[in-house]
Image (cartoon, helix red, strand yellow):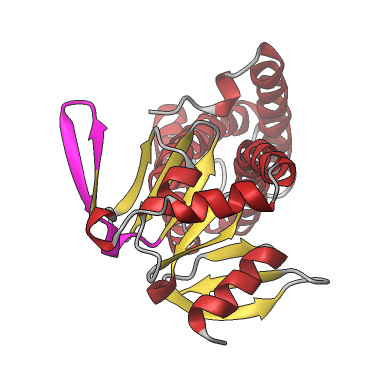
Amino acid sequence: MQAHPIMDSPRRWITALLLIATAVGVYTGLLTVYAGADLSPALTDAVISIVLFCGLAYLSWFAIGIVSSVQTEMVVSVLAILFWLAGGFAVQEWVELITESIYAPFTATVPFRALFGILCWVVIMMWYKMLSLQTIQPAFREETATEEESGPEENSAEESVRPSEEEYLNRITVKDGARIHLIDTENLLYVQACGDYVTLVTPEGQYVKELTMKYLETHLPATGFVRIHRSTIVNVTQISRVELFGKESYRLLLKNGDKLRVSLSGYKLLKTRLAL
């Protein structure tokens, strides 16, 4: 399982600790000023609530990483915020039980708890998305440079070694610890490059395998799969629509809601394959 990006460098987790301390201070201030709570119970509530929030944000990286789609991100986000609000209620009840006094009505704190949580969650999700893009972009540049260096003769040679219909892949095996997943190629939604590996995206989830995009491009059925970008091969049966996205750039909307970038050359190839 991929490590959480916060552990990649001391600079990141030190920055995270400083942000957590700031969040505790802001949260304490909101409880004391907005809800009229005393400093001690407000600080206790803030510390426990922020730690709970950080735990949910930490775990969400792995949940979204397993199934990366808009629907998954929305479901995880909504459940996390609801769970955090429920945790805040439990924390307040626990603090009031310890102090034997009601330091703030919970209904009075719900608006700023929800607003505080949603704003922080959006920032964290945007950071996760940025990290995902930074992981994929080096593969974009590497494959772009490789294809620019190859001439028409090399591309013609690749076409000449394309396998026959009988040699096309109809199943891909992926080893995951003690388990081996058998993925039928017809169930693939799309494939994305990630360094020396590829991510196979299916309705059931995502699987990482050590393969090259060039190998998959020549060994996936040509009638069903198109390389729409240096880093993306898509199953044409999963395409919902093609839309213009900026000057001379396009993107695909898949049936599951995912959106994929399409290069100009990929769009031309897609038009040829789909007879658009």
Q: Is residue 119 left or right of residue 255?
A: right
Point 64% across, 50% down: residue: 153
Q: Is residue 82 left or right of residue 46?
A: left
In the image, residue 108 sits, relative to residue 36, either above or below, namely below
Q: Nearer the viewer, residue 7 or 263?
A: 263
Q: Which quarter of the rendering shows the N terminus? A: top left
Magenta stretch: give its range.
173-189
Q: Provide residue 21's location: percent of width, then percent of height.
A: 69, 24
Q: Nearer the viewer, residue 205 or 106?
A: 205
Point 68% across, 62% down: residue: 263
Can see residue 87?
A: no
* Name of the residue lying farthest toward the right: 247
Q: Provide residue 19's location: percent of width, then percent of height.
A: 71, 28
Can see residue 172?
A: yes
Q: Is residue 156 magenta?
A: no
Q: Nearer the viewer, residue 186 or 108?
A: 186
Residue 261 sits in quarter: bottom right
Point 80% across, 71% down: residue: 246
Q: Is residue 27 left or right of residue 260?
A: right
Q: Provide residue 118's location: percent of width, then percent of height.
A: 61, 54
Q: Is residue 185 magenta?
A: yes
Q: Nearer the viewer, residue 96 or 200?
A: 200
